[in-house]
Amino acid sequence: MWCRRPCWLLLALSTQSGALSPSPNRVWFSPSEVRASPGFAAACAKVEANHELAYASTANSRIKAWADPGETDGTKSSSSISAHSSLGPIPVEAVGAFSDCAFPCPPPPQFGDRELCFLTKAPIFSSGECAAVVAEAEARPERWSAQSQFYYARDVTQQVEDLPKTREWFGPACRDKLFPLLEECFPGAVNKANKANAGGDGGAKNLRIFDAKVLKYNATAGQAFLGVHRDGSLLTAILALNSDAEYEGGGTYLEPLGKAVRYSTGHVCCHAGAVRHGGQRIESGVRYALVCFVDLYGGLELDRALSNEADLFRVAGDLAQAEDWYTYSLCASDEALEALEAEEEE
């Protein structure tokens, strides 16, 4: 079976200097041949190794307490946090489904149709907890830094791991509230991925934080928005640290739904990392939020990891490598191949 490379891939490789020519051998590919190639095996091994290295970084002395699984050999750390909630089910509302999108698309492989984005109906963190995070960050204003590595970013951040009081609070906050919330909202992603990749025991106890930041949007300082992008994590959770009455505009923009959702102190917005989103521009005032990027022990999204590597090759101008890695990404996803095969049948 031969498949045609999708238009977005050919376009991405033809709109830069030194673009690849659209010859027939670049338009068509054989998934079975690609999957059997040494290049595909080596690419998969590389991203799997990168995932393990990233996981190992969560076991260092600074952020071990944020993750549940402890060590890279698969054993559980004695200092790890097991997720449980004393709150019971947390009331949430679904912001939208993948089938609700302006251009309906299937959800990522591990997600159900309605597992796009959720908002808590009531605050799950107190105004005092949120104010304490802001106060600790603002006590060291010289530590706010621009996300210069991301061309689309116009906000400033501080790492949670660099805020001692916030870091101490954040571990139990993940255990008692955040991880159970994510399991409640994304059972497809959390439980299916666990069963497939992490020994079959499922549940929030295999979630872990790869990164967490305090964000600041300041309209008068020109630090007013975060452009549309995808996150590298399985899930993303954003905690509002101040009232939405303190700024105009703002919120989390969800590109598939074509709208921004606003939420106030203590509320959490959570969405699939693969969903294109951004920080909506604020027109006045200051907005604070804490964002955390959540992954799953053993839950590597192979197709996304390969595509991310392809992006790096493309940005660096190595279009031949980018083409190969985008093709590897397509071949790593049964759903993507099924969609391409369906197009050919039509």
Image: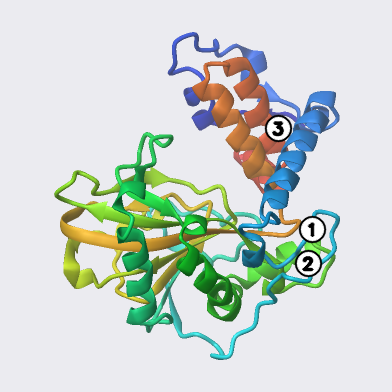
323 left or right of 217 in image: right
Q: Where residue 77 is drawn, which disc sits there?
A: 2
Q: Residue at x 68, y 54 (%)?
A: 60
Residue 253 in the image, given as x and y percentages of width and height: 33, 56
Q: Earlier in the sequence, mark 3 or mark 2?
A: 2
> Viewer-nearest of labels 3 and 2?
2
Q: Position of residue 264 (x, y in %)?
A: 29, 73
Cα gap from disc 3 to disc 1, whole angstroms: 30 Å
Percent of width and height locating residue 21: 54, 10
Total label count? 3
Cβ–Cβ under 8 Å for marks 2 and 1: yes
Determine which quarter of the picture holds residue 9.
top right
Q: Amino acid at mark 3?
A: Tyr
Horizontal and vertical percent for residue 98? 49, 60
Q: In this view of the protein, can residue 344 be seen by the observer?
A: no
Label whose residue precedes the other's in the sequence (3 or 1): 1
The image quarter containing residue 195 is bottom right
275 left or right of 266 in image? right
Quadrant where the N terminus is found in the figure: top right
- The residue wearing badge 1 is 71
C-alpha gap between disc 3 and disc 2: 35 Å
Disc 1 residue type (three-letter): Glu
Q: Is residue 316 visible?
A: yes
For residue 189, side relative to residue 1 (left or right):
left
Q: Which quarter of the rendered picture does the C terminus lie within?
A: top right
Q: 336 or 193, which lies in front?
A: 193
- Within 10 Å of disc 2 (Cα), the crowding (few <14, some 14-19, many 20+) is some
Q: Secondary structure at mark 2?
A: loop
Q: Nearer the viewer, mark 3 or mark 1?
A: 1
- In the picture, residue 299 is in which quadrant? bottom right
Reading the image, the residue beneath label 3 is: 328
Secondary element under disc 3, as helix, strand or loop, is helix
